[in-house]
Image: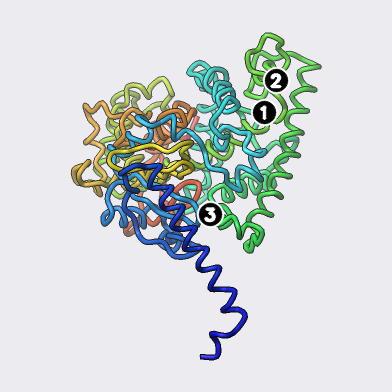
Amino acid sequence: MAWLDSPVVELCFPLIFLWIIYRFVTKKKSKSNRGELSLPPGPRPWPLVGNLHLLGSLPHKSLAELAKKYGPIMFLHLGSVPTIVATSPAMAKEFLKTNDLIFANRPATSAGKYMAYERRDVAHAPYGEYWRQMRKLCTIELLTTNRTESFRWVREEEVSAMVRSVWEESEKGVRYVNLRKPISTLTLNIICRMFAGRTYFDHELGGGEWFVQMVTEIMHLSGIVVLGDFIPSLAFLDWRGYCRRMQAAHKIFDVFADKLIDEHVERRRTKKSDDQDIVDVMLDMAESESSEIQVSRVHIKAIVLDMLSAGVDTSATTVEWAMTELLRNPQIMARAQEEIELKVGRDRIVKESDLASLDYLRCVVKETLRLHPPGPLLVPHESTQGCNVGRYYIPPKTRLLVNVWAIGRDESVWEDPLEFKPERFIGSSIDVKGHHFELLSFGAGRRGCPGISLGLSVVYLVLAQLIHCFHWSVEGDLDRDEVFGLTLPKKFPLSALPSWRLTTEEPI
């Protein structure tokens, strides 16, 4: 037993003793803070990593399985980050409505620090006056119903261009068309024309592949799990280089955003145009002495970054999942096509003005968002103070994850939850705008998505055009494998065989 006499052991014993005293004191203090209430149930954490090892490659599924054991409110330690997971409509309502103000904050992350201008965008900004002003800028000036409506012609032009590209691809003798590429290109073009007045193919904007690679890298890194965000003591390692890549992507985007703003400033000096894009609107506010919100160059860059990272992939992912489910269920596809034919006919394409009358199509989109929410765990929230939820105490600085993917598949909430049944929404008042906590695709409360109307208008129009203009067929069974990230896309792109079904010989 000579090892007991070693100096290392002599040092360890007092350290262990001090650690026991520390744990006793902090536990007693925590107990006094929360009174007689206890923390929610959850799995026992490992040293250092906590419960991170339980998440796996598809955290929304792993957390759904854990909730079956520990219940709809569950407490985890993700590294050193205390985390609550809500997995029922009632619990989601408790956090996003009853205690909305307490959980209106966002946790600090590497993506917010390195890519989003030190959290000066809307998505990553901490709750406070700055966030309120930025949110107000979006909801009152940039993403209003009237502003969204003013870009209707852009959406219709780009969707028609996508239909033509699919038709031309099929006319080349290509047997199957990879639908992910034209749909992603479409949503990117719409967002670009809204903030820049042009598509990414324009040379002056950065052009083609270079621009696509930049946007793809930003979206990929926005959904990456960075170890240092959960174990701050290991942040300096950055052993996979994610933080370095974020800094590099930010530099490239910043150069692009400066060129974009400079181009708008120069154009405004030489001529005035009635067709204003979103950068023009923000520059008007920056130049106005009476504007309530003082807009700077950084504000403009941060808003453009949010539009690219949040507006492109979510709509494209939803459309691809909707087409996958329709191809897996031909009778539902046929019913949706029949509705469009009845309202629109087969001698023209669908216009946005037609969408309000397409009730079954809207049910198809709701059902897609139920089974395949683009953000399965929503964007994380963080508590600003301790609070009581039911019989449990939630400490301050606790991260909140709402598992909307699990809620959408809960058999106590939905009948036949794994079946794709748009009919369940016929005559139902349930919407996706944050009022009904069994369907929270866009979040709820103060931090709900401000671009809901724009996102839905794109999804409705793209899906209507694809199923109205073409017959679609596939061979074999379609997979529903997923990849977890900023959104929840199909693991493998959807490929299908299109054939023109309208009475016109080709797209107009």
Disc 1 designates what residue?
300
Q: Which label sits on residue 283? A: 2
Tag 2 or tag 1, which sits nearer the N-term?
2
Tag 3 or tag 1, which sits nearer the N-term?
3
Residues at marks 2 and 3, CA–CA distance in whole angstroms: 38 Å
Visible residue check, residue 323: no
Q: Which label sits on residue 230? A: 3
Viewer-side residue, 375 vs 9: 9
Q: Who's the residue at 24% across and 32% down the image?
A: 425
| Residue 270 occupies quadrant | top right
Give the number of the mark in front: 2 or 3: 3
Residues at marks 1 and 3, CA–CA distance in whole angstroms: 30 Å
Q: Position of residue 402 (x, y in %)?
A: 38, 43
Q: For the residue labelled by badge 2, is the local secondary structure a helix, a strand or a loop? A: helix
| Residue 404 occupies quadrant | top left
Visible residue check, residue 207: yes
- Please name the amino acid that badge 2 sits on: Leu
Residue 240 left/right relative to 380: right
